[in-house]
Structure formats: structure tokens, C-alpha cells
Image: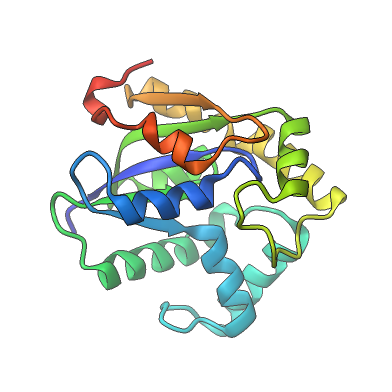
Amino acid sequence: MKPFSAILLIGPTGAGKTPLGALCEKKGLWHSNVFHFDFGAILRCIAATGPGRFDLTGPDVGVIRRSLATGKLLENRHFPIARNILLSYAKEKRMQGQDLMLLNGLPRHAGQAVDMEPFVRVIQVLALTCTPEVVKERIRRNTGGDRTRRKDDDRDAIETKLSIFRRQTAPLLDHYRQKGTPILSLIVEIDTTPERIYRQLSKPCDCINT
């Protein structure tokens, strides 16, 4: 399978990744169609309803449920679960050569990034940065409008996610920087909307470097 092109969206919980991804999918980006792969939302759906359209087993669903219950990331030995979900999603969307996938929630650490290289080419990293205080207030206010039915937004869960993000996901920026992948960092405030961020993404990725 020829690797498909992707934009990796990185940011802590509450930074607005999901509403931004939905907006990019609706409007497209850089004259390309965008498919928003919201890994967290897909995992929550699988945990609630079963594997559905994805090539997963009952034990796979059990692994996903335990991961969500503890707030921990899927471990390296469970990467085949993530791979099956991602490839099933790409096949379902019938991605073409100029299409872009917006990766939200996968990869979550450098090991997963390396495992994805045979079938994903990350051409741009979009990093949403905000302080823990801003994260908590954005979630409290539901600034992005996507937290209404979330059951994992209590104080302890938020602290766990922020800790995991700092230790395991944020280092992805160094991983891609070393590979020469363009990185665009945008500061997110309490009242930052997805529309405001989208307006800053008007330049093609090959014109943005850090």
C-alpha cells in the first residue's frame, strides 16, 4: 500500500483538536479534501458499541476499554489495534492521491510514529499549545463545544491526561523536527475558536517551517 499523506494535530486535552478537525474536514485545506481521523472519538465509540466496521476482536475491544478507563495510551504491543482502525478508516474514505488525513490522537508517541511510517507520510505537524490553566477553563466552559457528553473530564482524569501528554506525546515534536517535517505551533487561549485557528492555516505546508 502506498503511504497516504497526513497532517498530525498535536495538543493537550481541551485544546480544541476535535472541533478544528471537524472544521478542516468540512472546508478542506490547501485545496485538498481532508478526512478527520479522531482516534479518541473512534475508541470511545468502539468501547460503547463494539468493533462495528473495524477489523477487531473481542479481546481488542477489551484492551480499548481498559485503556479508556485508566486514561493510559495503548501500549506498543497493542499497535496492531490502532493500525487496523486507521487502515479500515482510510479504506472506508477511499482516499485519493491529493487527499489529506488529519490525524488527531494517533500517533501518541514516537514508537507509534515509527510503526506508522510504512503507510502514513506526515507532511505537516500542527501543534496547539496552551497552559494547564487554560485547558481546565476551556473544558469547564466547553469552549470548543465538543465536551457535552464526555465522561472523562473530571479533575483527576484531566490531570492524568496532561501528565501523559507532557511525558509521551509532546516529545513527538522533537521526533518530527529531527526528520525535517514542517511544524506550525499555534497558541490557544481560553476563547480561541476553531475558526480563528483555521484562518491561520491558509498557507500550504511547504511554505511553513520552524
Figure label count:
0
In this rendering, the answer to whether 197 lies above or below 70 is above
Q: Can you tell which quarter of the image residue 85 is in?
A: bottom left
In this rendering, the answer to whether 3 lies above or below 67 is above
Give the residue displayed 52% in from the left and 67% down from the top. 42
Q: Can you tell which quarter of the image residue 171 is in?
A: top right
190 sits to left or right of 8: right
Observer-nearest of 144 and 111: 144
Can residue 105 be spotted in the picture?
A: no
Give the residue displayed 55% in from the left and 64% down from the top. 41
Q: Can you say which quadrant of the picture contains the C terminus?
A: top left
Give the residue displayed 71% in from the left and 28% down from the top. 131
Most extreme residue toward the right, as rendered?
A: 156
101 sits to left or right of 204: right
In this rendering, the answer to whether 90 lies above or below 4 is below
Can residue 42 be spotted in the picture?
A: yes
Coordinates of residue 143 in the picture (x, y in percent): 65, 46
Most extreme residue toward the left, as rendered?
A: 97
Coordinates of residue 40 in the picture (x, y in percent): 56, 59
Q: Can you tell which quarter of the image residue 204 is in?
A: top left
